[in-house]
Image (cartoon, grey):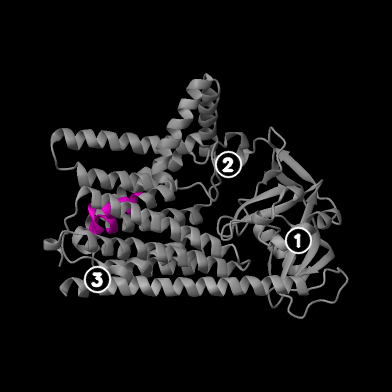
Amino acid sequence: MIRQRGLFPSALIMLALAVFTSLIAFLSWNLHAEEAHSQRAISVDPHSEQPANLVGAACVIRHGKQMVMVSEVISQKLSIPGGYIDNLDTASEAARREALEETGLNVEVVKLLQYRGRAAIFACVTTQPILVAKQEAKEPRQQIAAWHAADFSREIKAVYLVSPLSVQDTEYRFPEDTPYLYQWMLETPESEVEFYTDISARASALHQTELIVIKAFKDWANHLPDAAKSVLDSMMWLLNLSGEYWFVFLLVAVIAALFGPTAMLQLLAATVLTILVSTSLKQIFYVPRPFYLVPALQNGAAYGFSFPSGHTLLATVLWGMFWMKLCAGKSWLSTWGGLLLVTGLIIGQALARIWFGVHFISDTLASILIGIVLLALFSRLITPSAIRGKAIWLGITVLTGLAAGLTLLPAHTYLFAISLGVFLSLDALPKRSLNLSVLRHILVALILLAGSGAIAYFAAVITSFSTVSLITLGMRATGAFLLAVWLVAGSSLMLKLLADPETTP
């Protein structure tokens, strides 16, 4: 009877989550159906009367047989520059403003192309040449220098010149509009383009010096034999893993299964706070990445700003925590040997970010120093006794919530959702240590990973049904919330179920 009472809160949480998730899915399907019906009901005649419920405006900007498109942070899809019409703006003024905020391009609105859904589509021409990164091979997408745009990193991942014929329905935010893109492009006057291979002169004196070193490093690597270059690429990929969010999430799930909820909560709290620090600093300094200035340096995917290196900062904190937990204070060999290994892994992570062309040397060095400071703070704040209490998680939840409201960064919204999920799941934690066999620990890890994958997949599916940014953001935040609850409440429930009977509270 005691065992059942201990499991009841966890079971109730899991049941509530199932009902909540089903409701979200039902509403998403209905929303998608209503949007599709709305699109079919609107006339596509460009000379039709303005819809009474007009809420948005967008700009078509053309060069040759390509048009300017933005890759969005929230939807993770392509769209033409556009947004909502403010009360004080006309539709054409809104289109011009949104083009500037999302792409950094000043445009003149030439003519109305079409009313599409509840948006007005305008033909626009830039008042200055579009600065485009020159690429060696002809590709359907060419990146535009847009890091100075107001919405860059917060709403926009990248700005491209894109052939509309290469855009698939699944990768465009408004799939019903893809048949019209080519015609809109043809009806739009052409804007001028200026291609560049190196604009490092726009960087600071420090970064210009660093770019010389990075170019020399890349030139040395490019002259290596193919076999050696392949080994180097593989090494850099492996060293870079410790800063990847998906890898850290997998690590959190494995830690929860093998070492218990306390260790998992310490790692999760450190991860949330470290990401919060790195993403906030990026929005303060606005440093462009090296490959924005010299496109040939790019050897890996990244978006947003360069300082600090979030990967290096996260790797410093994670490897530092492992060293303090498993090596520090043990034998001389364990302490110093572990420190040497951890130092090598952190430096390797920093080197990988430079190799990929996504960070300057100073970005990574500063990130290591910031990581050491965070480690010192975490060693005092995120203790095994404190991390299981609600006070610290309430503080983290409030902190991430304030950051989300002030910065409007989607990443901060997701961090808030994760923190809230953990805070609401703390009552499900086991009250004392539980003994499990090795096989049962492995079973818990596999179930946690499978459940996490299912939640992530389901969240991705339901978000694909909406074209409204706020709804998409809410859906993704809900997925992050469910993942956090699953990690805490789900792991606690499984550990209680599979523990030896004599150790169960």
Query: Which of the labelled discs sits on residue 196, or is there none?
Result: none
Query: Which callout, 1 or 3, points at the residue further toward the start of the chain?
Result: 3
Residue at horizontal 60 percent and vertical 50 percent from the top: 147
Please state the extent of the stretch shown in magenta in the rendering.
251-265
Instruction: Identify the image quadrant of the C terminus.
Output: bottom left
From the viewer's side, name the closer residue of 166 and 372: 166
Let me know if residue 44 is in the magenta part.
Answer: no
Residue 203 is tagged as 2
Q: CA distance from mark 2 to mark 3?
A: 58 Å
For label 2, the SS is loop
Q: Does residue 410 appear in this view? A: no
Front of the two marks 2 and 3:
3
- Residue 395, how many percent across, how many down? 32, 68
- Please tell me which of labels 2 and 3 falls first in the chain: 3
Neighbours of disc 3 within 10 Å: few (<14), some (14-19), many (20+): some
Q: Residues within 10 Å of mark 2 (few under 14, many from 20)?
A: some
What residue appears at the point 73 percent right and 79 percent down from the top-left corner? 53
Place of residue 439 in the rendered image (x, y in percent of width and height, measured from the top left): 24, 49
Are the two marked residues, 2 and 3, in contact with CB atoms closer than 8 angstroms?
A: no
* Type of amino acid at the residue the image marks with label 2: Ala
Query: In the rendered image of this protein, does residue 442 appear above or below residue 38?
Result: above
Q: Is residue 259 magenta?
A: yes
Mark 1 to mark 3 CA distance (whole Å): 56 Å
> Are circles 1 and 2 on residues that touch, CB within 8 Å?
no
Secondary structure mainly formed by the magenta segment: helix
Secondary structure of residue under mark 1:
strand
The amino acid type of the residue labelled 3 equals: Leu
Q: Height in image: 300 above or below 386?
A: above
* Earlier residue among tags 1 and 2: 1
Residue under label 1, please give it: 59
Distance between the Cα atoms at labels 1 and 2?
30 Å
Which residue, given by chain and number where applicable, does mark 3 sit on? 7
